[in-house]
Image (cartoon, rainbow, N blue to C red):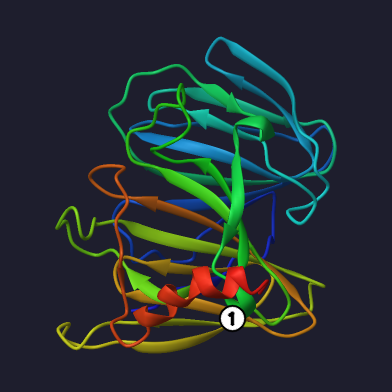
Amino acid sequence: MDYFASVAPQAQVTSLPYNPCNLLDFQLLKLAPGDGHSGAASDREIVAVLLGGQATFDVNEQHFEHVGGRPNVFAGKPHAVYLPAGSSFTITANSAAEIALVSAPSDLQTAPYVITPAQVTSGMWGAANFSRRFNQILTATGQPGLPARRLIVGETITPSGHWSTYPAHKHEVDDLPAEAFHEEMYYFKVAPSDGFGIARFYTGADRDPAIEENYTVRDNTILMMPFGYHTYVGAPGFTSYYLWFLAGEHRTQAVIEDPDTRWVSKTVPMLRELGH
């Protein structure tokens, strides 16, 4: 089975060429000024993340004008729009716009809403050469008034030559409070766009057959993870971005780090105290 693919835009709407996940799905919109895209959420909830540009959203009877504004994913916090299950929508580009549509099954009855940059929680994870910045767009904690059934959505910006999602972790079974099951996908951008990184996706010895894959990440590639450990490193000279989104039976997050490298997490307070 394939877990990695290119989603470089070939048309106004680019979908996954295949999908090993049962819950998550992804589409990429690339709209010229004035272009429109219409759809229906059906039995899924959708989060539309403005990767770059600005658009107007008509969702059922609600009208959200001029959503977005950052030119690209490396230039500030995002705007996003939550499209609930059962809704119909039209997205009209006010400028050239690139929009990620991430979705998962939902039975939640709620109104659509806009997530503004002021509602996005940002910070730093890790330290030294495994530090990276994050933007939490839609998570279960710290964002009152933003309901969702399954989706958890955020962004990570990885500096040149840094590791990200390190130590590698997994979230493939419900065993709270230690671990929570979530499928996950990473949609990547690289700056400059001819750069690259390496994503490692693998399973523990208890899974048969075991998987050990290393993928060359380039601009507009996606890693799809229904299970397994995952981590990423960007090549020196290039800044990396990935949109991460998860779905499971609930929105409580809990992960298990790879036992061989989990000790690295204990060094973070010391490294930060030393200014790394």
Residue 226 appears in the rendering: yes
Which quarter of the figure is the C terminus placed in?
bottom right
Q: Residue at x 69, y 61 (%)?
A: 10
Q: Nearer the viewer, residue 59 or 263?
A: 263
Residue 216 sits above or below residue 167 on the image: below
Residue 165 appears in the rendering: no
Q: Nearer the viewer, residue 187 or 61?
A: 187
Q: Residue under label 1, please give it.
A: 233
Residue 226 sits above or below residue 198 on the image: above
Position of residue 65 in the picture relative to residue 114 (left or right): right
Which quarter of the figure is the N terminus placed in?
bottom left
Q: Residue at x 63, y 79 (%)?
A: 129
Q: Residues within 10 Å of mark 1 (few under 14, many from 20)?
A: many
Residue 209 sits above or below residue 30 on the image: below
Q: Nearer the viewer, residue 28 or 68?
A: 68
Q: Residue at x 25, y 42 (%)?
A: 250
Residue 185: x and y in percent read 45, 61
Q: Quadrant of residue 167?
A: bottom left
Q: Residue at x 49, y 47 (%)?
A: 153
Residue 109 sits above or below residue 204 on the image: above
Secondary structure beneath dot 1 equals: strand
Residue 176: x and y in percent read 17, 53
Outermost top residue? 61
How many numbered discs, if any? 1
Amino acid type for the residue under numbered disc 1: Val
Residue 244: x and y in percent read 50, 56
Residue 67: x and y in percent read 72, 29
Position of residue 258 in the picture relative to residue 38 (left or right): left
